[in-house]
Amino acid sequence: MSTAAHAPASSNRYRRDWRALLTRHEMLLLYVLIAEWLFFYFAGTSTNRRGIIVGFGTWDRQFDILRHSCEIGLLALALTPVIITAGIDLSVGSLLGLCAILFGKLWHDAGLSIPVAIGLTLGIGALAGALNAILITALRLPPLIVTLGTYSLFRGLAEAITRGSITYTDFPEAFLFIGQERWLGLPTQAWVFLSVALAIGLLVHRTTYGRAFRTIGLAPEGARYAGLPVERRLALVYVLAGLIAAIAAIIYTARLGQAKADAGSGYELFAITAVVLGGTSIFGGKGTIPGTLLGVAAIAVLKNGLACLPVVMRLNAAEEMSGLFTGALLLAALTASVLPKILSNLRSRRHTATQSTSTLSP
Amino acid sequence: MSSPLLALRQLVKNYGGVRALRGVDFDLHAGEVHALLGENGAGKSTLIKIVTGAHAPDGGTISLAGQPVANLTPASARALGIACIYQQPALFPDLTVAENLALRLDATSAHARVDWTARRARTTALLDRIGAAIAPDTEVRALSMPEQQLVEIACALGSGARIVIMDEPTASLTQKEQHLLYAVVRDLRKNGVGVIYISHRLEEIFALADRVTVLRDGQSVGTHAVGDINEAGLIRLMVGREVAQIYPTAESAPGAPVLSLRGVGCTASGVHDVSFDVRAGEIFGLGGLVGAGRTELARILFGLTPADSGQITLAGETLHLRSPQDAVAHGIAYVPEDRRRHGVVLELPIAQNITMAVHRKLFPTTWLRFGAERALALDYIRDLAVKCAGPDAPGGSLSGGNQQKIALARWLATRPKLLILDEPTQGVDIGAKSEIHKIIRRLAQEGLAVILISSDLPEVIGMSDRIGVMAHGTLRAILPGGSDPHTVMAAALGTAA
């Protein structure tokens, strides 16, 4: 064993780490992802643009999956730190819509250049996140309620601005390059997605900020008693979530070539699903960025793969099937993660029940 | 005399290594008020928990009216006529008084129709019996603490309780409310109910009780008719033990004052007019009963509940502590009382628990340095002799004493000027206790100013260079270390020494 050779003094520890690594949640999810992919590789077919039947295993399809998972993937990355602190942000999907509209308006109506409009949109996203942050940290309102409120507020603003009818289109070619072309072999937006993943991954796993998020999620009072700046750290995760939602809005607009008020509606729920599927505990304290990326991938492959199953194509039921199987996958993953604990609880309860069957004497 | 209503014989209860009760005998007769007295941790709460069926004893027998009872559960205790009124009433705040009573007293099925008229009538009758003017339709949320206690008593009466346990019922009552409660207790006695009355107020015991039993270190040290004993005698019974443990002593005189408090108070937490100094190298003990305001004072000094009056000076600098970050930045460290909620994050590895308060110093660029973290953790594990599988083991895998050492290590790593320890040896076994004592003394010896809050009277007397005694939110006396326990107890009880 090569790892043991490098560190003979602690070979035992390393061997135990290996076993833990192979059975941890992320690895299980990776097995699921591989199984999904292989299933669709053999069972799925599809037609290309010229009407020729092609398989699931083409490079084009892999890039297509990647391209389509960037926006929900970004929102999932935004939500992972939030959920690690035992919070939630339901407003990211609506904020994506609001930012898309404002970006379109800044470019089209205000006549700003694309880079300036992007910069301003990112600022607006961060500000909207700051609104969540202030309500949650300064007023100590529950994140679920606050972001349920801003979920409606942001979407309502987007619809009010467009009066439900304006759609911004005719973006320049150079901008559409971000969403529709490839750069260095990958869909352009994938580079943005991967950069954000790397940045958030480092923040969560390699800095004192990530430590604080985790500690706050596990023991908010304990974190306060340890002198950690609980409010400031909580504020940071919501501001970051707003900023990343704005990035997702830019990519969304560039991919579709249009900005509409209903952009990203329902995305927050897919993103939360991906995060939880990736092993992040909704109660806080536990979760990894690699897990979230695998969760995003598992959902994206499932969704895309289902669409190219012959039976699904015949029934024309890709949307319904993908909802059904995504839900089933999430519930199965959650059940699998709590099953060992429930079984051991049941065993101990039966044990105590047999102990206390002797009743009162008087 | 007929067999007593309640007889406990040789009751034993251990919590891990802590022997909470070691063979206690206790009798309660019908129509008697029997007071139970003892220091914090003497075993009163444990005794109550056993009688109410919350905890099972490890040994001994419980008899009710001559009949031995085994496997007491909270439900069977209630069915047998044992009711307990806690300091904090356990009512549902959003339900009305009548609904709360019905929940406790009625065993109706979910399908039965609710007879509101009967419910209200019964509630009114029960409340009338104890002379409480409370409308049955009032929501419990709207009632004051003493009114809620009266509702609890009405519940006990309504359930036909033969034994009523009252755990410090007057702790939060005004003088007038106390007298109302006394009348209720006397009325219960007249109706043949046996009352176990727990209180720290000696005058109350003399006014109300027929007999008094004193617990000390989990043993009964005597039962007396109240006519046969005086206050001094009771205090002697409560504390009158030889100091069993050897405490490490100071080898050098303390230096210059590090911390000065002048008239410090906080309205929100009920602390007022606290003034004292703590010197470098000194252990300043804070004694007093539970609720005297010691933890509240510590929370002020750590910025958790900022002071709204007085002046706090640390090393010559006047401080305005608004948050724990302020306190940590100025070199104040606080090892909290509730170790599991505030002290150690049980799910996190030992190393992360130890470095939690030194993120800025250890990771100046905010990038984690795992090697440095591990090295620091190993240093403290070795230095404080923490028994653990290694720095990666979760905090929850440790025993209470070792968890406490981790909590201590976290704050030592900040190199504080002032260390506040809140009940550092509570729930810790004897061996780890004396180890922690040695560590505390060594830290003082190294020039740290230490405030030691402890409800363990021998500990606070044995460890401290000076002892501040608190009662009712303020400092009542400053006594020299090694003082007579009777003097300390008398100050804590608020009786003139």
Image (tube, coloured by chain):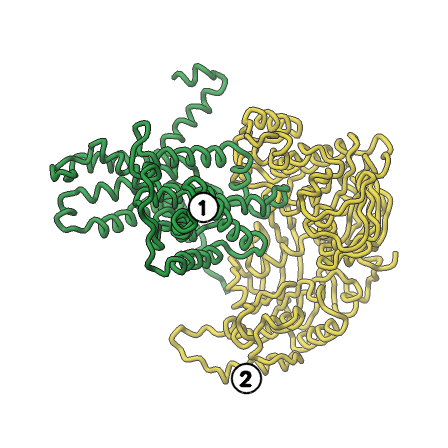
Chain colours: A green, B yellow
| Quadrant of the frame with the N terminus of chain A | top left
Q: Residue at x 61, y 50 (%)?
A: B12
Measured as percent of width and height from the top left, residue B376 is found at 62, 27
Q: Quadrant of residue A17?
A: top left
How far, Cα to Cα, is label 1 from label 2?
66 Å
Q: Nearer the viewer, residue B460 or B375?
A: B375
State the SS at label 1. helix
Q: Amino acid at mark 2?
A: Ala
For residue A105, side relative to residue B350 (left or right)? left
Q: Which residue is mark 2?
A: B121
Above or below B411: residue B44: below
Marks 1 and 2: CB-CB under 8 Å?
Answer: no
Direction from residue A154 to residue B389 in the image, left or right:
right
Q: Disc 1 residue type?
A: Thr
Is B447 or B292 nearer to us in this picture?
Answer: B447
Dividing the picture into quadrants, the one containing residue B249 is: top right
Chain identity of mark 2: B
Q: How many marks?
A: 2
The answer to whether residue A351 of the structure is visible from this angle is no
- Residue A208: image x %, image y %? 55, 35
Task: Determine crowd level at label 2: few under 14, some 14-19, many 20+ residues with C-alpha closer than 10 A.
Answer: few
Give x and y (percent) for residue B30. Answer: 65, 71
Where residue A260 sits in the image (x, y, percent)? 34, 52
User: Residue A209 occupies which quadrant of the picture?
Assistant: top right
- Residue where numbered disc 1 is placed: A121
Residue B163's label in the rendered image is none
Taking the image as shown, residue B247 lies to the left or right of residue A195, namely right
Vertically, is B478 above or below A188? below
Q: Secondary structure at mark 2?
A: helix
Q: Are marks 1 and 2 on the same chain?
A: no
